[in-house]
Image (cartoon, helix red, strand yellow):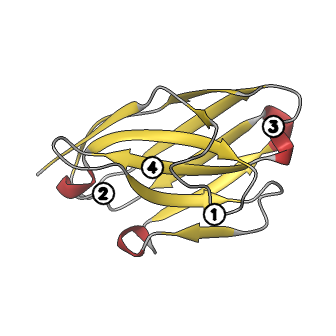
Amino acid sequence: QVQLVESGGGLVQAGGSLRLSCAASGRTFNSYAVGWFRQAPGKEREFVATINWSGGSTYYADFVKGRFTMSRDNAKNTVYLQMNTLKPEDTAVYYCAAGRRFRVGPDAPYWGQGTQVTVSS
């Protein structure tokens, strides 16, 4: 069993940066891939980025490539999403999810409760 808690969201101006954290409980966390997803008001949840169990491989949605960087510290049971050059369209609730597959999908078994990111223009 894995429990996930996101933090680090907030209000930031366009062009600014935020770092989201996804803290996990559970002894087997370092055997799971972790993905970040987001959901804006009135829109479906969409994939943002994913990282494999070791942190050696990452994959990003096209709309965040070059701006967002995902990393993990298994010693701290924490995954990070560094978000730079934020745009108003990045405004959403951001969720982390853990699963066995590298490309963590909407069917991932473990999800956090989400953290709000708001980017003002």
Q: Amino acid at mark 1?
A: Arg
The residue depicted at 59 percent of the width and 70 percent of the height is 59
Q: Amino acid at mark 4?
A: Phe
Q: Nearer the viewer, residue 109 or 69?
A: 109
Q: Which residue is mark 1?
A: 103
SS at badge 2: loop
Q: Amino acid at mark 2?
A: Leu
Labelled disc at residue 29: 3
Looking at marks 1 and 3 on the same chain, the residue that comes earlier in the sequence is marked by 3
Query: For the residues carrying marks 1 and 3, which lies nearer the camera in this image?
Result: 1
Find the distance from the CA under tag 4 to the CA under tag 3: 18 Å
Q: Nearer the viewer, residue 98 or 62?
A: 98
Looking at marks 4 and 2 on the same chain, the residue that comes earlier in the sequence is marked by 4
SS at badge 4: strand
Q: Position of residue 28 (x, y in %)?
A: 87, 35
SS at badge 3: helix
Q: Position of residue 99 (x, y in %)?
A: 69, 47
The residue depicted at 45 percent of the width and 73 percent of the height is 65
Looking at marks 4 and 3 on the same chain, the residue that comes earlier in the sequence is marked by 3
Q: Measured along the vertical axis of the image, is residue 87 above or below residue 91?
A: below
Q: Amino acid at mark 3?
A: Phe
Q: Which residue is mark 4?
A: 37
Horizontal side of 80 relative to 11 (left or right) equals right
Q: Measured along the vertical axis of the image, is residue 62 above or below residue 21?
A: below
The 10 Å Cα crowd at callout 2, few under 14, some 14 to 19, many 20 or more, is: many
Q: Which residue is mark 2?
A: 86
Q: Quadrant of residue 1?
A: top right
